[in-house]
Every structure is written in C-alpha cells, then in structure tokens.
Amino acid sequence: MSLFDSVRAILFDFDGTLIEPSIDFDEMRQRVLDIAARYGLDTGPLAGMHVLELVTKAAAELSEHDGKSEAFVADTDQAVIDIEVEAASRVLPYDGVPAMLDALHAHGYRVGIVTRNCRPAVDRVLERFPLRHEILLSRDDVARVKPDPHHLRVALDHLGVPAHKSLMCGDHPMDVDVGKAIGARTVGVLRPGVEPTYFCDNAPDVILDHVTHLLQILA
C-alpha cells in the first residue's frame, strides 16, 4: 500500500514549483526596507524577514507610533506588486507541468494552487500558459496567507476534500511545514541546483528532483 493511496486532492505552490522562479526576493526586500527607512523605521530587525511578514511588522510599528501605517502599506504593496507583475511577464512553466496537471485531472485528483504571489501576477502567467486547476488562491484571496494553515484549509474546503486526504507540494520548507500543520501528506520539490539537504529540517514525505515526478509516486 502506497503512502499516497488515500490522496484525493493536491495543493501546489506556484513560483518555483509549477513555474520557474523569477522573482528577485532580495531586490523586493531591499525596496521594502528602503521604504521602511524613509518612514523612519529601524530596518535592522526587519532585514532577515520574509517580505510579507516584514511589511506586517513594520506597519504595526508605525501604527503604534505615528499612524502612518496605511500609507506605508500602500507604498510597499505597490513596490512588491510591480516586481511580481514584471516577473510574471517573462516566466515559464517548468517542462511537463501543463501535461502533468492534465493527467492528474484525468485520474480524478482535485487540484488547487496556493500562492503568496498577488492575483494580477498569477493571472498574467495563466493568460500566457493555462494550467489546469479547480481552485487558485493568491494572497489577495484569503484573510491569512501561508504559512498560516488557513490558506490551505480554504482551498480544501472549496475542493471538498479533508486535509488527511490531501497532499501539499512545494519548493520551500514553508510549504512542507504548512502541509504538515493541517495533516496533509507533503512533497518537497528541489529547484535546479538545490540539494536534498535543503529540506533536512522539515522532513517531507517525499523529495522530488522535478515536480512532474509526482505522477510516478501517485501511479
């Protein structure tokens, strides 16, 4: 009996999992930090954070002191979206991904995509390269984005599949951790040049060199 025999729904991360990674997160973080500095914040404690969490923390600090949090959030949101949308105009899906998604549909799996990317950027990619799915939730579509389990639970509620019959597949340790948090099976996907030790602290059920190898473990 396979570890994945009970799986009925598969949730995929987007950037770096289904499509090539194209967002320069270092540039994005630096732009946000530059904006934070203009608002008078000490950027040192913020420098090592994920960008979305960085914005939230900085906005909370501004709200406590001078009430400029709304303007700060508007400025940083625009900076982040500009980078995401520009990247979406040149990104490609990984080889074999559209065919894999079609095959999963043909075999009766429910497919969802859960991404921290913004909706305009994701839509721009899908206009160029339609990728079969039944639910797609960007950060604009949920109250709390992954690594909060809420993001995945909303997707599974739409698909009508309980968490213990689902699988979360992504290229970041965050994807593995949030999948485990809801009781899903987990698959870690290695981006080109990334070693399997990348997931050593997260212990996904399976580590794959390419997302399309998922078909083999589900066969």
Image: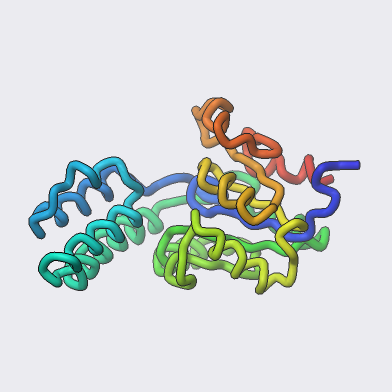
Image point (22%, 44%), residue name: 45
Circle count: 0
Q: In front here: 117 or 125?
A: 117
Q: Position of residue 41 (x, y in %)?
A: 13, 53
Q: Quadrant of the N terminus?
A: top right
Image point (71%, 48%), residue name: 185
* Above/below status of 48 relative to 70: above
Image point (59%, 70%), residue name: 154
Q: Residue furthest right?
A: 1
Q: Residue furthest front?
A: 64
* Above/below status of 77 relative to 43: below
Q: Position of residue 21 (x, y in %)?
A: 44, 45
Q: Position of residue 156 (x, y in %)?
A: 66, 66
Residue 215 appears left or right of 179: right
**What colour scheme does the image use?**
rainbow
Residue 150 appears left or right of 116: right
Q: In front here: 205 or 107?
A: 205
* Above/below status of 85 relative to 3: below
Quadrant location of residue 217? top right
Q: Position of residue 128 (x, y in %)?
A: 49, 63
Residue 60 appears left or right of 19: left
Q: Quadrant of the C terminus?
A: top right
* Above/below status of 195 relative to 162: above
Quadrant location of residue 98? bottom right
Image point (13%, 48%), residue name: 42
